[in-house]
Image (tube, rainbow, N blue to C red):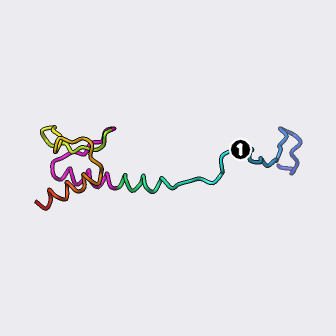
């Protein structure tokens, strides 16, 4: 079926493409990916911990907030970091 010849159809060209001058490096940088993954894992863990206490973890441009069942912010804050949320949940569980 195949004669090994490519002359009865669309001609095929085999050419290596050289990198364009001043183009981005072909080496990818994943340095931020690990940090983003760790933040996501921490956020998911804190969401589960907050839910067990009847709270909801919410995120906005200002930061994170814990919302109680009456839909009020805990400590009237909406600018907490994940570390502050974790510290607050640790204090509540000890007290």
How many numbered circles does the render carry?
A: 1
Segment colored magenta: 42-61
Is residue 47 inside the magenta stretch? Answer: yes
Residue at which label 1 appears: 22
* Magenta run includes residue 66: no
The location of residue 93, given as percent across then percent down, is 15, 59
Left or right: 21 as drawn, with respect to 55: right
Q: Nearer the viewer, residue 91 or 11?
A: 91
- Taking the view exactly as shown, the residue that stands out farthest to the left is 95
Q: Position of residue 20 (x, y in %)?
A: 74, 44
Q: Residue at x 26, y 50 (%)?
A: 47
Q: Is residue 62 left or right of residue 71?
A: right
SS at circle 1: loop
User: In the rendered image, which quarter is residue 60 located in?
Assistant: top left
Instruction: Say left or right for 10 vs 46.
Output: right
Vertical order, 77 against 50 (above or below) = above
């Amino acid at each position: 079926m195949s004669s090994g010849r490519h002359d009865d159809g669309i001609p095929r060209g085999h050419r290596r493409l050289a990198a364009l001058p001043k183009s981005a490096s072909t080496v990818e940088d994943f340095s931020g990916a690990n940090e983003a993954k760790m933040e996501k894992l921490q956020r998911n863990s804190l969401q589960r911990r907050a839910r067990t206490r009847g709270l909801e973890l919410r995120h906005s441009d200002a930061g994170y907030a814990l919302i109680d069942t009456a839909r009020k912010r805990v400590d009237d804050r909406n600018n907490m970091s994940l570390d502050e949320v974790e510290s607050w949940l640790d204090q509540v569980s000890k007290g």
